Image (cartoon, helix red, strand yellow):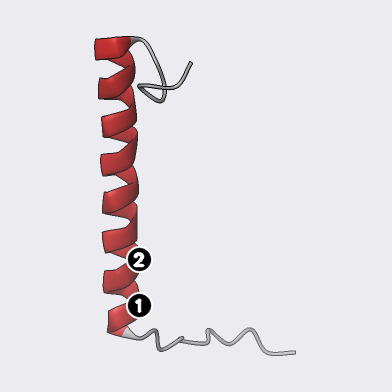
Amino acid sequence: MDNKQVKRNIDPQKITAEKLNGRFALLGVIALVGSYITTGQIIPGMV
């Protein structure tokens, strides 16, 4: 049995999309923390 390293060819558009998705997710978390700090509520306006 050979231990060959298989190089996967990943589409550059998928890498860019995943990076962008991660950045928007972090932006959402920052918005959530900022909202919680300023109002004390996770979703402002909800009881």
Image coords of residue 8 (percent x, y): 46, 86
Q: Is residue 20 above or below residue 43?
A: below
Type of the residue with mark 1 = Lys
Q: Is residue 32 above or below residue 23?
A: above
In the picture as drawn, the residue positioned furthest to the right comes out as 1
User: For mark 1, what is the residue?
Assistant: 14
Image coords of residue 44 (percent x, y): 35, 22
Give the structural element (helix, strand or loop) at label 1. Answer: helix
Q: Residues within 10 Å of mark 1 (few under 14, many from 20)?
A: few
* Rendered image quadrant of residue 41: top left
* Rendered image quadrant of residue 36: top left
Name the residue rendered at 35%, 86% in the picture.
11
* Rendered image quadrant of residue 26: top left
Give the structural element (helix, strand or loop) at label 2. Answer: helix
Type of the residue with mark 2 = Glu
Image coords of residue 30 (percent x, y): 27, 32
Image position of 24 (left or right of 41):
left
Image coords of residue 22 (percent x, y): 33, 54
Q: Residues within 10 Å of mark 2 (few under 14, many from 20)?
A: few
Image position of 8 (left or right of 29):
right
How far is mark 1 from mark 2, CA to CA? 6 Å
Image position of 4 (left or right of 12):
right
The residue nearer to you, when weighing 10 against 40, is 40
Q: Quadrant of the N terminus?
A: bottom right
Q: Is residue 13 above or below residue 44?
A: below
Name the residue rendered at 63%, 84% in the picture.
3
User: For mark 2, what is the residue?
Assistant: 18
Q: Check if mark 1's residue and mark 2's residue have beta carbons within 8 Å.
A: yes
